Image: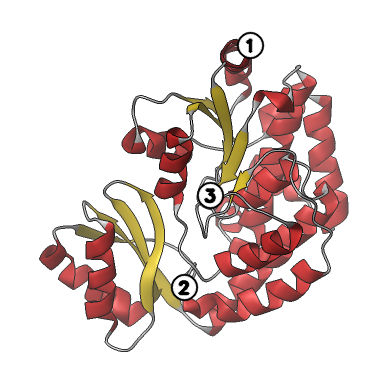
Amino acid sequence: MGKIAVIFPGQGAQSVGMGRDFAEVSRRAAEVFARANDILGFDIRQYCFEGPPEQLERTDIQQPAIFVTGIAIWEALLEKGLSPECFSVSAGLSLGEYTALCAAGSMEFDAALRLVHRRGQLMQQAALASPGSMVSLIGGDKEGAVKLCEKASQGEVLSPANFNCPGQIVISGVKSACQRAVEMAGEFDCRAIPLKVSGAFHSALMQSAADQLGEVLRDTTVHMPRVPIIANVTAEPHTDPDGIRKLLQDQVVRSVRWQESMERLIEQGVEMFFEIGPGRVLTGLMRKINRKVPTVNVSTVDHIEAALGKVLAESG
């Protein structure tokens, strides 16, 4: 029996219409969206299903929207007969770590959604208070990205934010430092593409958000998850509830070690990944990390039957 990991996407995976097809065919998915509306006090379902895009791209809307969609799809799959016991381990990219923890019973849905919503608000506020940017480096490696940040920073904040996959690293910091990095990228054998984001996420410019999120986390009930959840910050499984709180706080200002996390899971015997949530971002990253390990994507209802067949065959 092969080991299967379930993974959940983060910010940037959103698209208008996400989750609507699941809510139309699954009672449990529809209930997730209805419950989310009650908790948040605004119509997150409408933002997911109808947009408009400019609202769905706001950090304070986008984060709860992606989280809710991921949990709705998860519940639709459980309603169809998927057993959580099929999965040996789980992970999520940045925001997706919250979805993974909630799906694994580490946090109740209501508490996790309030936490995610507050996280989005705090990160949006930090972005307005300390304007920054992010740049995707194409073709570079970890060592080169670190050196580029050191040279381009010139005393300003600039650091690696996401180690996504081979040849794709994102750096984050003050806008002027990001611009210098774009100009210097060729010296480090990579291309630099400025990203359309509202702030310098996973950098020291988010420290105010991390500090305030820590206060919210201290008041949030956290249990050990039913399966190991890989922490973005360490690329290792979470070990205890207090550690979960601390690493979720640290994640706001520290690098996401996604490639390393996935490679470690493969080394530990994971033979299939199961991506649940809007879009195909993680499926695309896995092709660059290790093409030999299949990733089953479930982002629309059309994927359900085939996905269930594959996961049940692999786990059975």
Look at label 3 and name its amino acid. Leu
Callout 1 touching callout 2 (CB < 8 Å): no
- Quarter of the rendering containing residue 15: top right
Closer to us: 200 or 33: 200
Q: Would you name the residue on which mark 3 appears? A: 93
Q: Secondary structure at mark 2?
A: loop
Q: Secondary structure at mark 1?
A: loop
- Mark 2 and mark 3: Cα distance apart in space: 16 Å
Q: Nearer the viewer, residue 27 or 100?
A: 100
Which numbered dot is residue 316? 1
Q: Which residue is mark 2?
A: 203
Residue at 62% x, 31% y is: 88
Say which of 2 and 195 sits in front: 2
**Where 19 sits versus 254, above or below?**
above
Inspect the image, locate mark 1, and give the three-letter code of the amino acid beneath it: Gly
Q: How is the image coloured?
A: secondary structure
For the residues carrying marks 1 and 3, which lies nearer the camera in this image? 1
Q: For label 3, count other residues whose C-alpha is less than 10 Å away and answer few (under 14), some (14-19) or many (20+).
A: many
- Say left or right for 199 vs 114: left
Q: Does residue 42 show up?
A: no
Q: Give the CA separation, mark 1 to mark 2.
A: 43 Å
Which residue is nearer to you in this view: 48 or 238?
Answer: 238
Discs 1/2, front: 1
Q: Earlier in the sequence, mark 2 or mark 3?
A: 3
Mark 2 closeness class: few <14, some 14–19, many ≥20 residues within 10 Å: many
